[in-house]
Amino acid sequence: MDKILEKKRQTYLTMFEDGVKDALKMMVDVKKNSSAYYNRGYKFGLSLNFEEVYVGDEKENQTYYLRTRENESE
């Protein structure tokens, strides 16, 4: 495969993946927000319907896991 095409494809996939990751964290990266691939990944990540849930006390809220929003009543 053409190396230039492969590099472009990898860049597109990376932008999409970054969008999904940022959606799960509910944080938009303004530097990447102009990318259509980032935005598609972000929208896809939101559609997964996950939220971050922190475990621990106020000083240790760095530990978290993801759960679906449907299970909010737990």
Image (tube, rainbow, N blue to C red):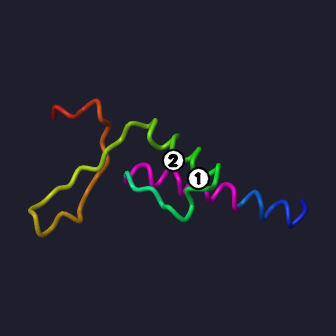
Q: CA distance from mark 2 to mark 1?
A: 6 Å
Q: Quadrant of residue 48?
A: top left
Residue 18, label in figure: none
**Magenta run includes residue 31:** no
**Mark 1, residue position:** 38
Q: Check disc 1 and give the amino acid type.
A: Tyr
Residue at 86% over, 66% down? 4
Q: Quadrant of the N terminus?
A: bottom right
Q: Residue furthest bottom?
A: 59
Residue at 78% over, 65% down? 7
Tell me if 68 is positioned left or right of 55 in this view. Answer: right
Tell me the magenta residue range: 11-25
Main secondary structure found in the magenta portion? helix
| Depth order, front residue of 43/21 | 43
Total marks in image: 2
Tell me if 42 is positioned left or right of 3 in this view. Answer: left
**Mark 2, residue position:** 42
